[in-house]
Image: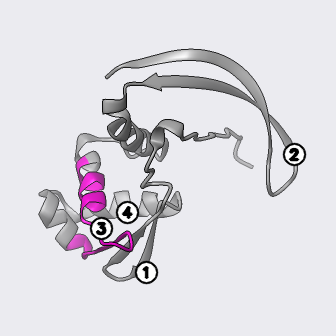
Amino acid sequence: MGLNFINDDQEIFIERNTGDSIICQVITKEIDDVDIVIFWRKEILRLIGEYSDTKFQILNWLIDSRNSKDCVVATKDEIAEANNVSRVTVTRLLTSLQQANLVDQLKRSTWKLSANLLQTNPAESSVLIHYVRPK
């Protein structure tokens, strides 16, 4: 995978809820076009602390199995069977995706995938990770 860091700058962002200014270190990654969608999906899993080849496979299956409304209609057991993994693995991944607002459970077996997960042009996407100490 071609990955280069092309700059290293600081920017100031305004926190929407509090109005606080946040000085952020900005690192820009240059990624080959061929790898961009794969890289984006793996990066999302890394950011939510769920990266593994198995969970990457499940995420790809969810994205590939969505309907025209970006919903997947399948139980956790069906997702597990389709990916030859345990229900526990599917539950862990879906729970983390829900906590990150990347998937919403509409019904027991209907999962709505977020537009943030389905980036059509991740080459122009940014993710801000704000580190804070627990209260």
Which of the two residues, 19 or 63, is positioned nearer the viewer here? 63
Going from N to C along the chain, the mark reached first, 4 or 2, is: 2
**What number is the disc on residue 94?**
4
At numbered mark 4, what does the secondary structure look like: helix, strand or loop? helix
Q: Which residue is mark 3?
A: 66
Tell me which segment is drawn in magenta: 57-77
Residue that carries the numbered disc 1 in the rendered image: 106
Label 4: how many residues lie within 10 Å, few (<14), some (14-19) or many (20+)? many
Residue at numbered disc 2: 20
* Element type at mark 2: loop
Which of the two labelled residues, at mark 1 and mark 2, occupies the earlier sequence position?
Answer: 2
The nearer-to-camera label among 1 and 3 is 3
| Nearer-the-camera pick, 89 or 59 | 59
Label 3 SS: loop
- Disc 4 from disc 2: Cα separation: 32 Å
The residue sitting at 12% across, 57% down in the picture is: 84
Q: CA distance from mark 1 to mark 2?
A: 34 Å
Q: CA distance from mark 1 to mark 3?
A: 14 Å
Q: Residue 18 appears in which quarter of the rendering?
A: bottom right
Closer to the N terminus: mark 1 or mark 4? Answer: 4
